Amino acid sequence: MANYFLDNDDIQFLFKHIDLGELARLQEDGFVHANGDPNGYAPHDAADAVDNYRRVLEIIGEVAGDVVAPNAEQVDRDGNTHNSDEGTVTLHPLVQENLKRLTQADMMGFTLPRRYGGLNCPCLVYTMATEMISRADTSLMNMFGLQGIAETIYAFANDEIKDEVLPKFARGEVTGAMVLTEPDAGSDLQAVRLRAFQDEQGNWYLNGVKRFITNGCGEILLVLARSEPEIADGRGLSLFLAERSERVKVRHLESKLGIHGSPTCELVFDNTPCRLIGERQRGLITYVMALMNGARVGIAAQSLGVAEAAYRLARTYARTRQQFGGPIERLPAVAEMVTDMKIDIEVGRALCYETARVCDLENNNLRILEMQSRGQGSLDKDEEKRRKQLSRSLKRMNGMLTPMSKYYCSEMCNRVAYDAIQVLGGSGYIKDYAAERHARDARITTIYEGTSQLQVVAAVRGVASGSLDAWAGEHEKRVYGDPLLDGLKQKLIEARQQINEAVQFVKSKGPSQLDLFGRKLVDSALTVIMGHLLLGQGAVDERKKRVARRFIERDLAALRMNCERIHAADTAPLDEYALLAGPVPVAN
């Protein structure tokens, strides 16, 4: 029996290495609910909670390995079916089977509170589960991984909506969709035009078209719409909940390069009844931003999953393929490629899981403050003040780490999937092996939920405003008592100083330069952050110490080059764009 948790040494290492007990204490309110849970599911202490998390991950690992993975190839070949006359979509029978098995395992309410039938797991544990499902079938993650829609409803909807809808999510009776993009409003969501209006009785309705909607055939649709037609920017947008009905049609099902099991829909809303989520005019600024932050961590985890699948295929092939009198893994060029694939996945996993951990800290701290504001908390004034300061700090840290994770992991998984084909050679280019499917599935990760370029724009603000210094400063205090680790730490300290010098240089040249050189700054900052994470792992594991050495020594060379290129101040892509890019080609 395959189990994608038990066969992954690195996930198991991180499960033990990260302090899940700390997250459990926050998630379970100090375990005060243990005796009041009528079903007896609430853990009694940190050890009990962590044991529950492990059991959950073993179950999801078994479903991923034994059920989802064997179905993936057939789902990719066949896809889903658009019923054009009815404006509906029929999911592939094997996709339906996958969802049914996840539902039977009680895995469709992963992070929801127990009162709605959920597992009340931290984001970090959900991220681990999402990676495993993505390794089995990257496209299925786009249904399993959209549980963030339920989280958004829990965070911002009224009690009537929550009590009605959230148990359906937990029971697996419904799936959801983030209905944001329009034909003329892709990354620029402030340009959304789909109209929301009220009748004389105050009931809300939706009119318009949405495009590129992942799982747009789902039963619960969170729709970003313009409720204030006189306000042209994001302040005129609100968030609405609509349910699948004859008043919303799937006009078109996209024919895509990859993730064929995930239906990507064009939706037409025709006076579709809906309900307001939260308050008017906060749809984009507050609610969708929170939803997309969670989704970006999900895409980072999805990227890890497809990269892990591609790496394993390449590693096995390099071991078994005989050429020149032995396995091709003995060839230095292949050995280096496979080694760096493995290291880059472990580095990305460390970053993604650290981001999920910070998300848990921020979300639980906000929940405690919200309870205090409603008169349900017991914080004294000093503790409340401390938590408000902590909230601001965690928000800034999350604002840097989340786009970094999505950017790095998605770019990394494309490299790994591409290199897997290269290791397999001609075999990687044909459909007899899954390598070509992994490459096709990987390609979307740098695009949806915000392109890599947009992630860089978001992340570089944290690098330039002190978030990198705050994060790295804490890790630089650590003394390892190991010559190799302490020597590598000193190199990271010097690297951060180089980054700060580059930041000051860029700032002196004007605001446009920050975006122009943003990718080089973010790549450099990532080297420092991920290097420190690997040093912490190397302190408790000899192999991880070697991984840290390989990564830091390798990537510091690129960091130095990036800083040198920044100081060279080559602004030709802006100043001479028309000349260097050439004339606009005439369409054939």
Image (cartoon, helix red, strand yellow):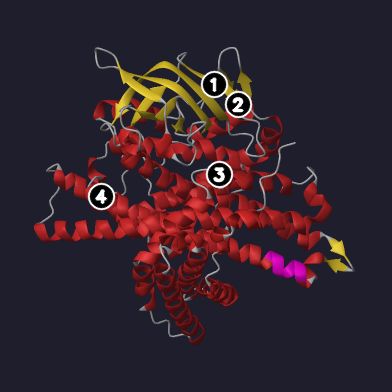
Q: Earlier in the sequence, mark 3 or mark 4?
A: 3
Q: CA distance from mark 2 to mark 4?
A: 39 Å
Above/below status of 112 relative to 164: below
x then y, percent, for residue 541: 51, 73
Tell whether label 2 touches label 1 (CB within 8 Å). yes
Q: Looking at the figure, which quarter contains the C terminus?
A: top right
Q: CA distance from mark 3 to mark 4?
A: 29 Å
Res 69 quadrant in image: top right
- Which residues fall within the magenta stretch? 333-338
Q: CA distance from mark 1 to mark 2?
A: 7 Å
Find residue 133 and name its label: 3
Find residue 366 and name its label: 4
Residue position marked by numbered label 1 in the rendering: 250
Q: CA distance from mark 3 to mark 1?
A: 26 Å
Residue position marked by numbered label 2 in the rendering: 253
In the orientation shown, which residue stands out farthest toward the bottom? Answer: 483
